[in-house]
Image: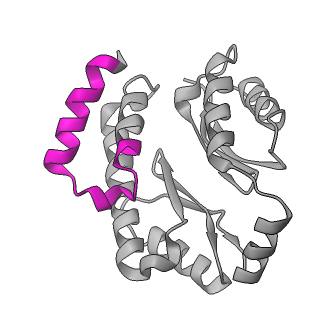
């Protein structure tokens, strides 16, 4: 199915959507759109989330600029999770306020971590955690996990602290997903903002 969707969605994306509206990685939008095609949600609900995410990323970039280059936005059923790192509590609160002001947002989970530059530099010396590798492992292991509907989950790793988001169809499914993530090398902590909601 992905071979069919990718060319079409890529064409639509570059035709109708400014690249900067989705951050530095436009292909991330295509990945989200392909996964959304098999989610347990209506196309209208998915469309709302896509518009909200675009508006938040655009507004945060316009109002905060390069100060929040490491802040990521995930939207599921109009709930929003912000993750990443900033250097002050004020910047974290500003990002949350901007996201909350976007029309259609129901709830904000502001999980942005405050790290002063000196703490970042010290952490880089003491031990490097490759969040990209962790996120790829989460994708692979949840995809292989029996009874885990990976397309309803979102995840972000920030210095080995993994934030889970989205929806589980049961508490059992959620617990299994958390257990899988906790077992990944480099993961130091797991915070779940996943809703348990049957079909």
Q: Which residue is drawn at the image coordinates 36% and 55% (left, top)?
A: 22
Q: Which residue is drawn at the image coordinates 45% and 51% (left, top)?
A: 78
**Observer-nearest of 111 and 135:** 135
Q: Which residue is drawn at the image coordinates 40% and 58% (left, top)?
A: 24
The residue most toward the left is 15
Tell me where residue 73 appears, x and y as whole percent: 50, 57
Residue 55, compared with residue 165, is above or below; it is below
Q: Is residue 183 left or right of residue 48?
A: right
Residue 184, visible in the rendered structure: yes
- Viewport quadrant of the C terminus: top right
Q: Using the rendered view, name the quadrant where residue 102 is placed.
A: bottom left
The residue range painted magenta reads 3-29
The reply to whether the magenta stretch includes residue 45 is no
The reply to whether the magenta stretch includes residue 7 is yes
Q: Which residue is drawn at the image coordinates 13% and 46% (left, top)?
A: 15
Residue 36, compared with residue 95, is above or below; it is above
Residue 156, visible in the rendered structure: no
Tell me where residue 37 appears, x and y as whole percent: 37, 26
Tell me where residue 35 appears, x and y as whole percent: 43, 29
Q: How many marks?
A: 0
**Observer-nearest of 16 and 174:** 16
- Viewport quadrant of the N terminus: top left
Q: Using the rendered view, name the quadrant where residue 8 is placed.
A: top left
**Observer-nearest of 155 and 116:** 116
């Amino acid at each position: 199915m992905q071979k069919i969707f990718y060319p079409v969605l890529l064409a639509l994306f570059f035709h109708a959507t400014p690249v900067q509206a989705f951050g530095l990685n436009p292909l991330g939008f295509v990945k989200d759109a392909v996964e959304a095609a098999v989610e347990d949600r209506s196309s209208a609900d998915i469309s709302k989330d896509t518009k909200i995410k675009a508006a938040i990323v655009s507004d945060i970039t316009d109002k905060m600029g390069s100060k929040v280059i490491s802040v990521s936005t995930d939207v599921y059923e109009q709930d929003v999770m912000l993750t990443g790192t900033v250097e002050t509590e004020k910047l974290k609160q500003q990002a949350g306020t901007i996201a909350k002001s976007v029309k259609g947002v129901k709830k904000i989970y502001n999980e942005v971590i405050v790290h002063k530059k000196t703490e970042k530099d010290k952490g880089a010396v003491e031990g490097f955690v490759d969040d990209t590798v962790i996120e790829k492992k989460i994708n692979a292991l949840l995809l292989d996990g029996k009874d885990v509907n990976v397309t309803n989950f979102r995840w972000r790793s920030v210095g080995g602290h993994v934030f889970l988001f989205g929806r589980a169809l049961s508490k059992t499914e959620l617990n299994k997903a958390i257990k899988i993530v906790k077992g990944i090398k480099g993961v130091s902590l797991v915070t779940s903002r996943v809703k348990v909601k049957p079909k």
